[in-house]
Amino acid sequence: MTIEQWNDLPGGFHPASAMDFLPKPQMRDLQFRRLTAVVQRAFDNVGLFRSRMKERGLSPADIRSLNDIVKLPFSQKTDLRDTYPFGLFASPMSEIVRLHASSGTTGKPIVVSYTKEDIEVWASVMVRTFAACGLHRGDIIQNAYGYGLFTGGLGAHYGAEALGATVIPISGGNSDRQIMVMKDFGVTAICSTPSYFIHLIERAGEMGIDMHDLPLRAGIFGAEPWTEQMRKHIEAGSGIKAYDIYGLSEIIGPGVASEAEGQDGLFIFEDHFYPEIVDPQTGEPLPEGEEGELVLTTLSKRAMPVIRYRTHDITAFLSGPSKCGRTLRRIRRIGRRSDDMFIIRGVNVFPSQIEAALLSVEGTLPHYQIILTRDKGLDQVEVQVEVTAEIFSDKVKAMEQVQGKLAHAVERTLGIRVKIRLVEPHTIERSQGKAKRVIDKRNM
């Protein structure tokens, strides 16, 4: 980047964000050089990748352009479980400085690894994330993502420190203390799941604290899908700007993509993570702007390079210039996953569709649960949704009106009727991490 280009960047620019504004031809050249290097590294050091390449009659020399990425085999989460714990590592343990793992609630956990260079990349993309959201040196960031084997806590922590901000490593849980620290320490930004922050807004109100009166101005929210309606609820209830970030442990953790202050899509840090959108059924690449499954390739990961990883997250590339001038590719916010879908009476249903419908009705709280059951061989859906205390304590007729509006909103969205049950505030268990929206009792 030339001095003239550097000086033309927007105000508040952080030096680590230089790559966010790289001209596209230079970005494509960098991506190709990194792609060929990572394919060679994986071929030389990862047995599963090498055998799949050979099955296709491919060698690293066959990757002669970025377009040739489609020749490479896909990878998926089962590959990490099948090679548990260290079968996909491309670096010897003597070079591995960090291990993280998933909870393993559905079988063997997935294990991911980092070299010293990988940790530095991770910190740099998180600096770019925070900078894109308008944070800077002098901010006080309360990090309520979980620490430990989960990647969220330490991923955000290292990036916030590298940004020059003051970091409060509070982790999740203990909501009263979270609110006390937020108030007493003059916190200006918080990192958490959006569902947990909604719980904090609610709990602060019970403690007589209005978040509008705090210096808090930004929330960096990720680790679960959330809708635009949820964003509006958060911003109205707290007075902050709510930013969506995206990441996954298999790729690096948080720091794969982030919104910027314009809130006009998520920018993928594509100098490190090459994105594709493919048809979820066929795996074929889709035209620009068409909705499909996001596939990611790590371009700089040394410890565990991941080639064409099927995320199951559904999104689309956004075209046209961004509000902030960043030249990185943008994707639409991810509201659903292909493996979150359930089928009711032949209709594909995603929890995010139900959430959007519920929050379109006044008096509905952003706490809901979808209960799936089976009666006489037929699948049934019940949506339990909290309403305000005023509505719940009102006359039966008023309750029935709200229930009817919710049922109509969901039917209009899905094309089928589902049972709506109104419950009083605090009935649905609050999450201190990722919210559990769907309870499937069909095989219980």
Image (cartoon, helix red, strand yellow):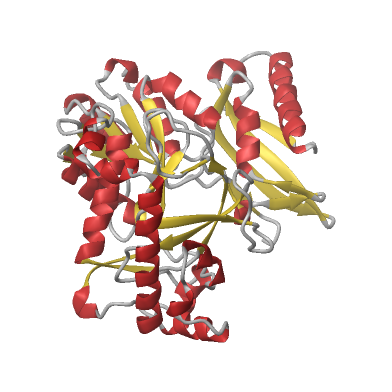
The image quadrant of residue 56 is: bottom right
Q: Nearer the viewer, residue 301 or 33?
A: 33
x and y, in percent, of residue 382 in the image: 70, 41
Which residue is pictured at 82% across the width and 49% down the height? 345
Viewer can see residue 85 = no
Placement of the N terminus among the 4 image quadrants: top left
x and y, in percent, of residue 277 in the image: 57, 54
x and y, in percent, of residue 290 in the image: 64, 46
Viewer can see residue 329 = yes
Q: Nearer the viewer, residue 193 or 372?
A: 193
Above or below: residue 132 compared with residue 232: below
Which residue is pictured at 41% across the width and 26% down the height? 202
Q: Horizontally, is 407 left or right of 324 in the view?
A: right
Which residue is pictured at 24% across the width and 50% down the height? 124
Q: Horizontally, is 101 left or right of 335 in the view?
A: left
Q: Horizontally, is 37 left or right of 334 in the view?
A: left
The image quadrant of residue 119 is: bottom left
Above or below: residue 417 compared with residue 393: below
How many marks do you count on the picture? 0
Q: Nearer the viewer, residue 5 or 117?
A: 5
Placement of the C terminus among the 4 image quadrants: bottom right
Q: Name the residue at the right extreme.
A: 376
The image quadrant of residue 97 is: bottom left
Q: Nearer the viewer, residue 441 or 63?
A: 63
x and y, in percent, of residue 76 in the image: 52, 68
